[in-house]
Image (tube, rainbow, N blue to C red):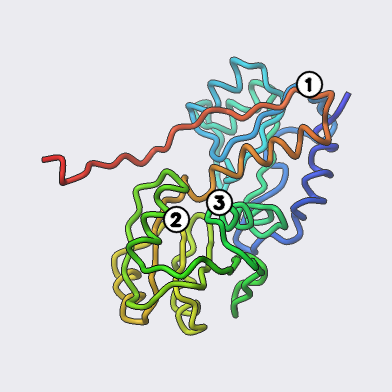
Amino acid sequence: MRTVRDFYNYLDVIAPFSSAENWDNSGLLVGGFDRTVQRAAVVLDLNSETLEQAISLEVDLIITHHPVIFKAQKAFLDDSLAYKLAENGISVIATHTPFDSAEGGINDILAEKLELTKVEILSLSDCEGLLRVGFTDTTDADEFARFVSEQLGADVRYCDGGKEIETVAVCGGAGAEFASEIAEMGIDAFVTGDVKYHELLDAKEAGLTLIAAGHFETENPAMAILASKLRGNFSETDIIVLSQTNPVKYINAKEF
């Protein structure tokens, strides 16, 4: 019978927990290493919706991307997710920034979804190994934004940097803080999840096409691939992907 420790050790090989950003909280967050695992689940976020599924499916271990415990907490009351997990004997491992930067992880998968070629790790001054950069067929901002939307099934927001696009940097989730340095490097476009208005404004001024494709949309495709990796190593364990809906809803003004 496999244990939580077996899954932790495997994840530590493909996405070493030692590579986590210093602000992150990845690793085993709920449960115990010696608990046995007959059924494991993979999901981007642990929330009331996905926890209910896990309980009904009698899951022993949940592997999440985002940590269920992120900031320091002074109490764990019976309405908290962590309390309910412990109450139901479910362990949780979070892969977050280690899987973001890992080979074959979030950002490699995002680059592949966008059909980038000659993909390399993009190292920035305050960020080692997290981002990726590659090439796309020469296009303009409008066409590339449409392509991103189609590939990710996303409602995108973007600014036009005003030049043809050949080089593209990617960072799943929240990576807009890197936009200014990416622009200084002469890269044509940057695809990430969350972007604020003034970040789009600054990017346009710097000549960078900045595309906000959604936090969920840029990271969730990797969950099925992570589950597939786990099935290849834990063939005797039932491994499922929990169903999660995007919490962000959109209304198109053109509909009115």
Please give the name of the residue rendered at 50% of the width and 55% of the height, measured from the top-left corner.
173
- Looking at this view, is 250 or 58 the one in front? 250
| Image depth: mark 3 or mark 2 in front | 3
Residue 174 located left or right of residue 97 = left
Q: Which mark is residue 113?
A: 3
Relative to 202, residue 91 above or below: above
Locate the C terminus by quadrant.
top left
Q: Position of residue 156 (x, y in %)?
A: 35, 53
Q: Are marks 3 and 2 in contact (CB under 8 Å)?
A: no
Locate the N terminus by quadrant.
top right
| Residue designated by label 1 | 38
Residue 108 located left or right of residue 7 = left
Mark 3: few, some, or many residues within 10 Å (few <14, many ≥20)? some
Q: Position of residue 20 (x, y in %)?
A: 68, 59
User: How far apart are the two marked residues, 3 and 1, measured between alpha carbons?
Assistant: 32 Å
- As helix, strand or loop, the secondary structure at mark 3 comes to helix
- As helix, strand or loop, the secondary structure at mark 2 comes to loop
Please give the name of the residue rendered at 84% of the width and 44% of the height, measured from the top-left corner.
9
User: How far apart are the two marked residues, 3 and 2, measured between alpha carbons?
Assistant: 14 Å
Mark 3: amino acid: Lys
**Residue 146 quadrant:** bottom left
Q: Closer to the N terminus: mark 1 or mark 2?
A: 1
Question: Looking at the image, which residue sits at the far right?
Answer: 1
| Image depth: mark 3 or mark 1 in front | 3
Mark 2: few, some, or many residues within 10 Å (few <14, many ≥20)? many
Q: Closer to the N terminus: mark 3 or mark 2?
A: 3
Relative to 14, residue 210 above or below: below
Q: Which mark is residue 193?
A: 2
Please give the name of the residue rendered at 36% of the width and 80% of the height, measured from the top-left corner.
207
Q: Are marks 3 and 1 in contact (CB under 8 Å)?
A: no
Mark 1: amino acid: Gln
Q: Closer to the N terminus: mark 3 or mark 1?
A: 1
